[in-house]
Image (spheres, helix red, strand yellow):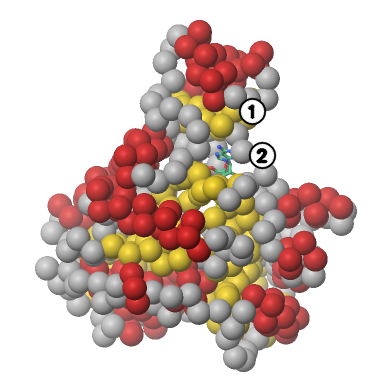
Amino acid sequence: MSFDTVLIANRGEIAERIRRACADLGLKSVAICSEADRDAPYGPKADRFVCIGPANAGQSYLNASAILLAARATGAGAIHPGYGFLSENAAFAEAIEQAGLIFVGPPASAIRTMGDKIAAKRAMIEAGVPCVPGPDTALPADDAVIAATAAEIGYPVIVKAAGGGGGRGMRVVHDPAALLDAVSITREEARRAFGTPELYVEKFLQRPRHVEIQVLCDAHGNAVWLGHRDCSQQRRHQKVVEEAPAPGIPADIAARVGAACVEACLRIGYRGVGTFEFLYEDGEFYFIEMNTRLQVEHPVTEMTTGIDIVQAQLRVAMGLPLDVTQAGIGCDGHAFECRINAEHPETLTSAPGRITEIHLPEGEGIRVDTHVVPGYKVSPHYDSLIAKLIVHGPDRATALFRMQAALEEMRIDGIHTNLPLHRAIFRDPNFRAGQTDIHHLEHWLKTQGAA
Ligand code: ADP
């Protein structure tokens, strides 16, 4: 089955990114918007631009029936969900297929398996993907069994909800005396927030890095991994800076884990792009979850592999076989991405408002993914990401200097942004040396009096 028109079920920089990929492949695009996004600069650039509902995302970007209606009305044959919103919603993927359209993403069954963290862990263990120590079964109700399970893993442990997401539904336990209370509180939270009280427990790693592996699979049994990324620079569990490749990972270890990810994809009948997220500590990878969608940080992998991941995703959705093999995938140089948010430097809350002026850096190896232009009004209704500054260099040291120069050059006036934070990060000697763990940024900001 093929299609010539793609509806982009998203907004912001990723809507513009997908529109461009469609245009590059000769596909028509339909952009959608809520009433708050009527002025989105990508709207007029798409072949059609349709308002599907009010500013409240529940009534627009999260409203599956409104999106399907817009697809039918515009003759779109496929729907690209982007990231966030409905991108990991198995029921949405199913509704699209039932309407005779194509979901640009994996089969609903794969989304469902990976959305259940216990089922995901079990599938990974079966495929030989290394996981965090701990059982791949739900905790029983029996207190004695729970205590014995945690003791066997060894403290500290982390109690996690099978249906959890977005950093919620987790509790670290350092002391056996606190275990049963942590379990009952997390269970109650999980029941309310995720609709299932199922929990599991695993070892809590104290100083891990966040390293992830990008995969790409077609519908003909071909799957490849596209190298790794390091996303350890986090603030309040949100990624701030990403890089590819993750520095200092031995090639043989990465190759072994990459091959296991490919094996897992083949076993679960995966299709499209996806990311296996790992904690990495003392030379070992530990799977934590799979994201069954395109990720914000995909550009750093595009820069180092030369593969346009969004185009690849669309080609797979059209039923085409992969045009790359594992042997043909290399890693050229080094890339960084800074997520530029409209946010208040002290409160870290989003800082909406009108952008008066923008100066984007230019030059060798510099790319900016953004939807904003001078005069653009950043809406208070959605995520505060307004641009991604991406640089590539022949090696990490060059890419570091290039990013520093680009950050100095970049200007966004009229609103608060986190550009000063990025400039500070790229001056931090530990970050510059590489291999810092997921707590480093927050600790370092504290020492700078700015956490
Ligand atoms: P979510 O789906 O909510 O993002 P994840 O399973 O991806 O949940 O975990 C989110 C974050 O929680 C991780 O990036 C890491 O910082 C922390 N975390 C999760 N599991 C562990 C663990 N076993 N040890 C240490 N930290 C963990």
Secondary element type, mark 1: loop
Q: Are marks 1 and 2 in contact (CB under 8 Å)?
A: yes
* Residue located at (73% from left, 52% from top): 440
Total numbered circles = 2
- Alpha carbon distance from label 1 to label 2: 9 Å
* Residue located at (33% from left, 64% from top): 224
Can you tell which quarter of the image residue 153 is in?
top right
In which quadrant will I find the N terminus?
bottom left
Could you tell me the amino acid type at mark 2? Answer: Gln
Q: Position of residue 410 (x, y in %)?
A: 70, 81
Q: Position of residue 285 (x, y in %)?
A: 51, 48
Which residue is more in the foreground, 433 or 67?
433
Can you tell which quarter of the image residue 87 is in?
bottom left
Q: Which mark is residue 271?
A: none
* Rendered position, 323 above or below 270: below
* Rendered position, 27 above or below 185: below
Q: Position of residue 198 (x, y in %)?
A: 41, 25
Secondary element type, mark 2: loop
Please indicate whether residue 134 sits to the left or right of residue 263 in the image: right
Residue 373 in sight: no
Residue 309 in sight: yes
Kindly identify which residue carries mark 2.
206
Question: Is the shortest distance between ligand 1 and the CB of mark 2 under 8 Å?
Answer: yes
Kindly identify which residue carries mark 1.
156
